[in-house]
Image (tube, rainbow, N blue to C red):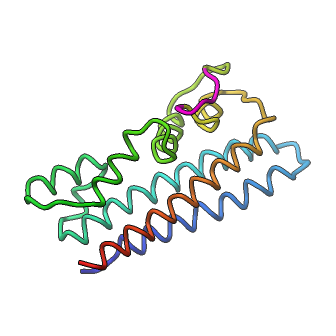
């Protein structure tokens, strides 16, 4: 087994951290392009977080000896596991997180999906089911008073993701 997706997951986690550092620097900028830089880094952080999650799904597929190229989303991994008759604690936990609208993973994926939408005004208010990041990314001209809260949200998601990956990797090593 090559573990190429273990490396890719780690790489994407690192890219997300690098872009968060750049986002924090953009917050301190006084340049004319400050807000454009912030919005750009917001979306790049989401891209790398979502890409890290996709790489992790493929990493899990590798551990179960499936072709990682067949896995783009959790439902693909679920289909492969069901077809092989294998049970996966990783699948159970990831499924619970994806389906729980209040979970960090659900919110992160929703914020990433919001990168493909647009609105010229705030469409919702943040609550336990909708993240401030998701609302911000959709807006063409967002309220930059929320920028520090968004960075804090991203850092929380990255920390949760790292902890999840470490825990699930440890569990996968046991068998």
Q: Residue at x 62, y 38 (%)?
A: 133
Q: Quadrant of the N terminus?
A: bottom left
Q: Quadrant of the C terminus?
A: bottom left
Q: Judge from the rendering whether residue 14 lies leftward or rightward of residue 25; answer left or right.
A: left
Relative to 137, does residue 89 appear above or below in the rendering? below
Q: Residue at x 45, y 71 (%)?
A: 166
Q: Judge from the rendering whether residue 80 lies leftward or rightward of residue 24; answer left or right.
A: left
Q: Residue 164: horizontal and vertical position, in percent?
A: 45, 62
Q: Nearer the viewer, residue 45 or 98?
A: 98
Whether residue 126 appears in magenta in the rendering, the answer is yes
Query: Residue most toward the right?
Result: 30
Q: Nearer the viewer, residue 107 or 68?
A: 107
Q: Residue at x 61, y 21 (%)?
A: 124
Q: Residue 27: horizontal and vertical position, in percent?
A: 82, 49
Q: Quadrant of residue 121?
A: top right
Q: Residue at x 38, y 75 (%)?
A: 170
Q: Residue 152: horizontal and vertical position, in percent?
A: 70, 50
Q: Quadrant of residue 174?
A: bottom left
Q: Quadrant of residue 149?
A: top right
Q: Judge from the rendering whether residue 83 lies leftward or rightward of residue 41; answer left or right.
A: left
Whether residue 155 appears in magenta in the rendering, the answer is no
Q: Nearer the viewer, residue 150 or 51?
A: 150
The part of the chain drawn in magenta is 124-129
Q: Residue 32: horizontal and vertical position, in percent?
A: 87, 42
């Amino acid at each position: 087994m090559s573990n190429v997706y273990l490396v890719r997951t780690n790489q994407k986690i690192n890219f997300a951290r690098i872009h968060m550092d750049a986002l924090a620097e953009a917050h301190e900028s006084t340049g004319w392009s400050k807000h454009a830089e912030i919005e750009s880094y917001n979306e790049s952080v989401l891209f790398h977080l979502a890409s890290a999650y996709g790489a992790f799904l493929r990493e899990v597929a590798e551990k179960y000896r499936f072709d990682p190229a067949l896995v783009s989303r959790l439902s693909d991994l679920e289909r492969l596991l069901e077809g092989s008759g294998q049970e996966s604690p990783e699948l159970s936990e990831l499924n619970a997180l994806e389906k729980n609208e209040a979970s960090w993973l659900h919110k992160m994926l929703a914020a990433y999906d919001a990168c493909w939408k647009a609105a010229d005004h705030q469409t919702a208010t943040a609550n336990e089911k909708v993240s401030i990041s998701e609302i911000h990314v959709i807006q063409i001209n967002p309220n930059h008073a929320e920028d520090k809260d968004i960075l804090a949200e991203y850092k929380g998601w990255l920390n949760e993701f790292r902890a999840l990956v470490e825990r699930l990797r440890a569990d996968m090593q046991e068998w």
